[in-house]
């Protein structure tokens, strides 16, 4: 009887132990589940919008800016090379006519000439030129003969002005000086008779070559001339 009672008590104790252990397990699991919930951290915040944002836009903008700068520079460089050409003092260019100065069958000199054969070209003449190549000049062509008068306003090069009649005979040569800076006296250089052509070349040309009154001028490249 005693053995039976002890056995029963032991069984009851074991049952209680098992029951208590089961309750503890449920509590532990619940606690573990709660504490194991992941905390939100900065690394969990999606960063794709920042880290995967394309940089092409920035590069393209930079490239565009560079291209704009280059274009602008080119434009400026292209705009600066046009302005320079317009504002720089012009220099003589190879002429589109020639004149041979002949005396007693001997050619004293041949020059290459730019042609000024309308009002605007004749009004401009050789003004503002800083230099004139040797054996180069300009021929002023008129529709007929008349007394011609020239001056040296805005002319920076000393010139020989050769007045030529319609038949090609030199009437006279005037040696023109550059006016003093600030002076309003531009001189007056007049033909000795009716002239249809006036040839302007560097001063000293006539003295050097012997061209003077009576010299014949044979033009080539003028309208109506061979």
Image (tube, rainbow, N blue to C red):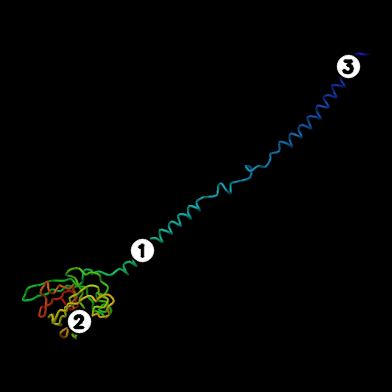
N-terminal label among 3 and 1: 3
Which mark lies nearer to you, 3 or 2? 2
Crowdedness near tag 3: few (<14), some (14–19) or many (≥20) residues, C-alpha within 10 Å: few
N-terminal label among 3 and 2: 3
Secondary structure category for the residue under label 2 = strand
Which of 184 and 63 lies nearest the eye of the viewer?
184
Q: Which residue is most to the right?
A: 1
Label 3, label 1: how many angstroms apart (C-alpha)?
114 Å
Q: Position of residue 29 (x, y in %)?
A: 76, 32
Quadrant occupied by the N terminus = top right
Label 2, label 1: how many angstroms apart (C-alpha)?
42 Å
Q: Name the disc covering residue 78, or none.
A: 1
Q: Name the disc covering residue 12, or none.
A: none
Residue at 57 percent of width and 48 percent of height: 50
N-terminal label among 2 and 1: 1
> Quarter of the image holding residue 184?
bottom left
Which of 128 and 20 lies nearest the eye of the viewer?
128
Secondary structure category for the residue under label 3 = helix
The image shows residue 75, relative to residue 181, as above or below, that is: above
Secondary structure category for the residue under label 1 = helix
Which of 92 and 166 lies nearest the eye of the viewer?
92
Quadrant occupied by the C terminus = bottom left
> Quarter of the image holding residue 11?
top right
Residue for badge 3: 7
Q: Position of residue 71 (x, y in %)?
A: 40, 60
Which mark lies nearer to you, 2 or 1? 2
Residue for badge 2: 189
Label 3, label 2: how many angstroms apart (C-alpha)?
155 Å
Q: Are marks 3 and 1 in contact (CB under 8 Å)?
A: no
């Amino acid at each position: 009887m005693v053995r039976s009672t002890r056995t029963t008590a032991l069984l009851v104790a074991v049952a209680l132990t098992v029951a208590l252990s089961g309750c503890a397990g449920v509590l532990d699991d619940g606690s573990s589940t709660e504490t194991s919930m992941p905390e939100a951290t900065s690394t969990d915040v999606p960063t794709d919008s920042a880290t995967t944002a394309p940089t092409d836009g920035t590069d393209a903008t930079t490239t565009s800016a560079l291209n704009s700068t280059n274009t602008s520079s080119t434009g400026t460089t292209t705009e600066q090379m046009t302005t320079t050409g317009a504002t720089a003092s012009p220099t003589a260019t190879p002429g589109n006519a020639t004149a041979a100065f002949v005396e007693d069958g001997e050619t004293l000199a041949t020059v290459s000439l730019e042609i000024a054969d309308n009002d605007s070209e004749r009004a401009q003449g050789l003004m503002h030129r800083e230099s004139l190549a040797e054996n180069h000049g300009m021929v002023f062509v008129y529709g007929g003969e008349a007394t011609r008068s020239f001056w040296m306003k805005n002319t920076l090069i000393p010139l020989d002005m050769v007045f030529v009649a319609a038949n090609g005979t030199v009437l006279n040569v005037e040696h023109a000086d550059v006016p003093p800076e600030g002076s309003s006296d531009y001189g007056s250089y007049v033909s000795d008779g009716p002239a249809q052509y006036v040839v302007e070349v560097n001063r000293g040309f006539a003295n050097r070559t012997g061209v003077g009154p009576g010299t014949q001028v044979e033009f080539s490249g003028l309208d109506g001339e061979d």
